[in-house]
Amino acid sequence: MADLVVSRPEGLWCEAGGFFIDPWRPVDRALITHAHADHARPGSRRYLCSAEGAGVLRARLGAISLDTADWGKAIDVGGVRVSFHPAGHALGAAQIRLEHRGEVWVVSGDYRVEADRSCAAFEPVRCHVFVTESTFGLPVYRWAPQASVIGEILDWWRANAAEGRASLLHCYAFGKAQRLLAGLADALGASAGTAAEGGALAQAPGPIVCHGAVEAINRVYREAGVALPGTVPASALADRREIGSALVLAPPSAAGSSWARRFGDASDGFVSGWMQVRGARRRRALDRGFVLSDHADWPGLQQAIEATGAGRVIVTHGYEAVMVRWLRERGLDAQSFATEYGGDDDGAGEAPDVSAPDVSAPSTDSSVQGEAGQGATPEAPR
């Protein structure tokens, strides 16, 4: 039987259903895992995504012909049974389950296994063939719990505010920024019942300022029902005291811009999984790097793959060769797809050159063990 999904010049192609998944060229029918720019590109005639992801996909692609599907609801697309399941990566991010002639494939897009309230939690889905990312597919990448990283950011913010320096925190505008805002609100005690409308943070050192690119996505999250703390535009800061106590969330592209320079002698920080590698922090000349990713780390990738029960795994972007080798050594049928993914979020090209990686590290890590299963109990392929 021919493979249900193959790689073509336009993207990942399902011939049985007549559609592409996350195509990188315009096509007739595109099924979208999530709205980061490397997975959701303009120009296709029709789109299909999770209902949770519709708002942010429209915010990024504009007026498109879009159909949606609720989590877990199976629909027929060209004779293939299709359903969307949470990937835990960002608002609306999905794994796409395909069933045809008794065989089940799952295309994961990007995913992370640690849950938070900014999006639906990752849900393991049983399948015969799992198509996985491998952005952080090296043993060096192991994440601390989110609450620990949020605590580090708060300590940095408070110390800067005490010195009268703004805290300029660079992060990706879609997903990472909103995850940080939700985590900060939880840690600081957002005013009950009013956070969704911009409630105050009871114990914050100062105001939270968001760059316009971040605020545009904040608006979509709030409309989707995700409670975020109140944020203000830079123009709303009245005096030097407010500027010096502010936490400023901005995309990496804002670094060195006239917009960023208005905050004076700010302390620069960056939030990304790549901050685990010292060279990435040094190249950006940062005061602080915080290790927090919306992708699975090395143990998380292994947990997710194992939870699918798949006997065959196809690796897309990231450290494909390392992951394929590791999987084969454990008796799985593994290969890779050449894709054009990686570049809009944590996969933005900070990867160090590791020519001889050690892939003999333990397969699990206590910091994430138990979090991968926060979605539904894995179901048997149907």
Image: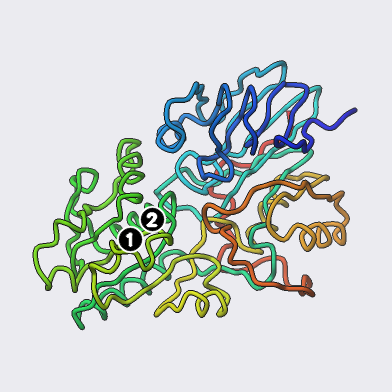
In percent of width and height, residue 248 lies at 28, 64
Q: Residues within 10 Å of mark 1 (few under 14, many from 20)?
A: many
Residue 177 is tagged as 2
Query: What is the three-letter code of the residue carrying label 2?
Result: Ala
- The residue carrying mark 1 is 249
Q: Quadrant of residue 38?
A: top right
- Point out the residue furthest to the front here: 258
Q: Residues within 10 Å of mark 2 (few under 14, many from 20)?
A: many
Question: In terms of image quadrants, where is residue 149?
Answer: bottom left
Identified at 14% across, 61% down, the residue is 237
Give amino acid for label 1. Leu
In the rendered image, residue 10, in percent from the top left (x then y), is placed at 71, 35
For image coordinates 58% across by 50% down, the residue present is 111
Percent across and percent down for residue 175 are 44, 50
Residue 314: x and y, percent?
78, 47
Numbered mark located on residue 336 in the image:
none
Say if mark 1 contacts mark 2, CB within 8 Å.
Answer: yes
Name which residue lies at 21% across and 77% down: 161
Q: Is residue 151 above or below residue 5?
A: below
Seen at 33% across and 56% down, the residue is 181
Q: Quadrant of the C terminus?
A: top right
Q: Which numbered disc, 1 or 2, marks the residue that appears first in the sequence? A: 2
Coloring scheme of the render?
Answer: rainbow
Q: Residue 4 is drawn in which quadrant?
A: top right
- Looking at this view, is 168 or 203 the one in front? 168
Disc 1 to disc 2, how far (Cα)? 7 Å
| Quadrant of the image containing the N terminus | top right
